[in-house]
Image (tube, coloured by chain):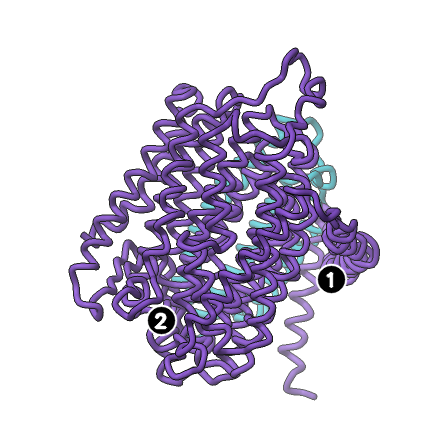
Chain colours: A cyan, B purple
Amino acid sequence: MMFGLVVVPTPTWYLVLSAVLFSIGAVGVLVRRNPLVMFMCIELMLNAVNLTFVTVGRAMSDIDGQAIVFFVMVVAAAEVVVGLGIIVSIMRRRSGVNVDDLSELKG
Amino acid sequence: MTSSLWLLPAFPLFGAFVLMVFGRRLGEPRSGWFAAAMPIASFLVAVSVYFDLLSRSSEERHEVVTLFSWIPVGALHIDVALLADPLSITMALFITGIGSLIHLYAIGYMHGDPKFSKFFLYLNLFVFSMLMLVLGENLLVTFLGWEGVGVCSYFLISFWHTRDSAAVAGKKAFVTNRIGDFGVMTAMFLAFSTIGSVSYSSINEAAHSGVIAPVTATAIGLLLFVGACGKSAQLPLYLWLPDAMEGPTPVSALIHAATMVTSGVFLMTRMSPVLHASYEWAPMVIACVGAATALFAATIAVAQNDIKKVLAYSTVSQLGYMFLAVGSGAYVAAIFHMVTHAFFKALLFLGSGSVIHGMHHEQDMRRMGALRKLMPVTAITFIIGWLAIAGVPPFAGFWSKDEILLYVYANNRGLYVVGLITALLTAYYMTRQVIMVFYGEAKWKDHAHDHGAHGDFEPHESPKIMLFPLIVLAGLSVVGGAMQLPFSKKLHFLEHWLEPVIEESEANISKTWAYENKYVLLVIAILIAATGIAAAFAVYGKKKVKAVEPRVLEQAWFYDAGAAKLVGGPGRAAFNAVAWADSRIVDGAVNGTATLVRNFAGQVRKSQNGFTRVYAALMAVGAVALLAWFLFRGVA
């Protein structure tokens, strides 16, 4: 290396990255109105959490952190199947989908 | 044969069911014959059970047949159980016996009625309920029958419901009886809370062994008496019975003379150990109410002009006699009089029905007279009934009335005098009725035109099917007294028969002056009856004395009108006030709570605005707040 600087990524980097990803996801869910985009933001939040799990698991030398990620991924996959199904069927019924318009079931 | 006991109520119930489904198809007169077969079958069963009991020793004449468990709830366990003992079988015998005769009579009387089969449906249902009442082994089964006969009575009083007066009379009977039912129910609750059972054997056993305190026994006894006052038409609840004469005459004979109205007396006799265990004054209350009713109704009967109203007030009066006996501890005499009264009063009612039938539905005695030549059988049987109720020996009524008076004399002489005056009045008004209907001048000729198109109107004798029951009942009214003759202990058949049921409670008068001089009382009773009859002959037969029929008596001492005014005026206001309190205060509290919750919920649900992103934001805020709480919890 040029300056003899060896940058070793510490777990903090990963945690900061996952916090940034999570925040992007959360803001996306709150500000966007397209259900498909909101859905992708939720996926982003889930994967940010996954990154946290793996980081902390690695830092503590505990395999559980990685194991639980698989559970999250399975659940997320199942959720995608159901969620996308619903969104597609809504999109077929109406044009220009906006989640704020989907408020027929309010009390 | 007690195993066949269930057949007793089953036959009439079956009959009622069949008539309900196929009544119209059976038509007239087949539905009538079919219905009549049911109480006859029950009567045969009752006779077989009677002989079965008779063949046993007197201690073993008590058998409970449990049909099924009705209400098994925790400590409350009630079976549908029937009780065969001398009292219930005595009742069952005369209910089914007289019931059969009246079914037969009704085939003739109801001829041509458009609701012919329905009438017999109700009659069968009535016989079923009445049998449940007397055969029930606990208060609840009896109460089932008690309500059943009340409902049938209502149906049958307002059988011709297109007539306004009949509909009103039915309602009046039903509502008045509610007051009595309240008493029975409260007594039942009290019995259950005190001894944990409503079966007669446990209640009477508890009363006998002194488990029930006198104050509780008094309360149970008097509450049951309230029920008896309603059902058996005693003061102050007798009001409905005279109006019940709006029903067809066979109904008056069966329900409102022979059977249902005596169920109060039956209940008091059944519960006699409880009365025995209560305070001294409790039976005295019953005796006084009975005596007051007997005298009160007898005075009214003197001035009635409706042939059935006379008999109705007479029935109230005779029921008063029975309660006088119950209150004096003379249960055997009460049952004895109940049975003989059932014979001769059913006879008199059926006789009056025959007259009404022959007179084309004329009921006013002032428009009758001299009917004995045109209706010989009715006249002769009616006269036998008259002699029986007036207390002429050797007819049935004389013996039973004398037995009651004997016990009453031993118990309380004041009440004895009331009883004698009642007997005098009874002889008087019944003689008056016989003279007005069957003797004197024929007054119906002047009123022939009232009866529509009958050009030459002439009363006629009734068909044979109606005369047959009259003849049988007349025979029973003659010999009925043989059940219990006063001459020697051996002739007290009814007393020996009923002994296991009322042994402990029956008053013992064998050492009193009255018992030792019973023949003196016998002669007094004969003299009293003779005086009453002679007086009526002088007034109505020979016309030597002008008849005194004050309006106050004709109007029943204005008691009915007074009660109507009271209930209609202040009573209605009070009911309205209660209804108002119920709808505003009681319902108001309930509805107010509901309204409060609804309004609050209406506010809260506004937060559910349907915007997904708002929900998501709230979740985010909540998550952050929770996180903050966990983080800073330890700091503070």
| Residue denoted by label 1 | B586
B598 or B113, which lies in front?
Answer: B113
Q: Position of residue B541 (x, y in %)?
A: 63, 42
Q: Mark 1 belongs to which subunit? A: B
SS state under label 2: helix
Total numbered labels: 2
Residue shown at the point (34%, 62%) measured from the top left = B485
Horizontally, is B422 left or right of B519 in the view? right
Residue B502 tag number: 2
Asked if one can make out residue B417 in the rendered structure from this viewpoint, the answer is: yes
Q: Position of residue B596 (x, y in %)?
A: 77, 60
Q: CA distance from mark 2 to mark 1?
A: 47 Å
Q: Mark 2 belongs to which subunit? A: B
Kind of residue at disc 2: Ile
- Which callout, 2 or 1, points at the residue further toward the start of the chain? 2
Crowding near the residue tagged with mark 1, few <14, some 14–19, many ≥20 C-alpha atoms within 10 Å: few
Q: Are marks 2 and 1 in contact (CB under 8 Å)?
A: no
Residue B298 tag number: none
Image quadrant assignment for residue A62: bottom left
B40 or B385, which lies in front?
Answer: B385
Is residue B444 shown above or below B147? above
Is residue B168 shown above or below A53? above
Q: Position of residue B527 (x, y in %)?
A: 53, 61
